[in-house]
Amino acid sequence: MRAPARELTRFERMEAWLSRLSIKNNFWHKVFSLVWLPYAFRSGIRMHGFRKGRAAEAFAAILPFRRFNRNFYDAMAGAALLGNSEVAAGMYLFSVCGGDYTIVCKEMKYRFLRPCLGPAIYRVVKSQDVEEKVAEGGEFNVALEMEIFQQKIVKTRDETLVGRCDITFHCTPKSMVRERSDRRKARKARLSATRDPSTNSEGDAS
């Protein structure tokens, strides 16, 4: 029989509240990025037009064409496009899973197609059913496919596909992370209690 879950500490309740607040809107996402994701804060990437419960294809993240993201020949830097792919996909997953999961990138493959000379738009074009995996419980892997476009600069020009990204994340419930941490602490305590103190004082008895 599984032991009942322990009561959360004050710090754990605060952390869960902050996690939920961070995905509420772009304002709070930007505030928390300043502390925990300084690269995302400086790049200025933001989520656009997506709410939990909508299809993955409704998701979009916009990377502005600012000096921090550009290279010496005034195009979007490859490192900015690549690095923000993980941020954009993580923003999507975090919005679907909520603040009760830790999300870690396992594998990412980015294909550069052409230079990006304006703001970049990240769109999820294919995703496994994340909400179904969350409903099943436990930890899981989820694979996403994204297409990256250069936002159209003038009305007469369409968006330009500049890259494709395949990325896989591992998602773990925070409750499971806490349980594992508690088990490790209990194991260490048991080992400490069963250690024979007389082995550290050889020769005391004669």
Image (cartoon, rainbow, N blue to C red):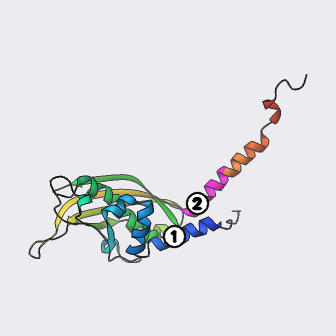
Q: Residue at x 78, y 41 (%)?
A: 194
Amino acid of disc 1: Leu
Left or right of 186 on screen, residue 93? left
Give the percent coordinates (x, y) of residue 110: 27, 54
**Depth order, front residue of 124/154:** 154
Give the percent coordinates (x, y) of residue 74: 16, 57
Q: Main secondary structure of the magenta part?
A: helix
Image quadrant in which the N terminus is located = bottom right
Region rendered in magenta: 173-184
Which disc, if any, is residue 167?
none
Label 1 element class = helix
Q: CA distance from mark 2 to mark 1?
A: 19 Å
Label 2 element class = helix
Q: Residue at x 55, y 69 (%)?
A: 16
Q: Is residue 181 magenta?
A: yes
Left or right of 183 on screen, residue 95? left
Q: Quadrant of residue 76?
A: bottom left
Residue 131 visible? The answer is no
Residue ID for mark 2: 176
Q: Residues within 10 Å of mark 1 (few under 14, many from 20)?
A: some
Residue 133 visible? The answer is yes
Q: Residue at x 36, y 63 (%)?
A: 41
Discs 2/1, front: 1
Image quadrant in which the C terminus is located = top right
Q: Quadrant of residue 57?
A: bottom left
**Depth order, front residue of 118/31:** 31
Q: Residue at x 31, y 66 (%)?
A: 44
Amino acid of disc 2: Met
Whether residues under marks 2 and 1 lie with C-beta atoms below 8 angstroms apart, the answer is no
Which disc, if any, is residue 18?
1
**Depth order, front residue of 147/70:** 70
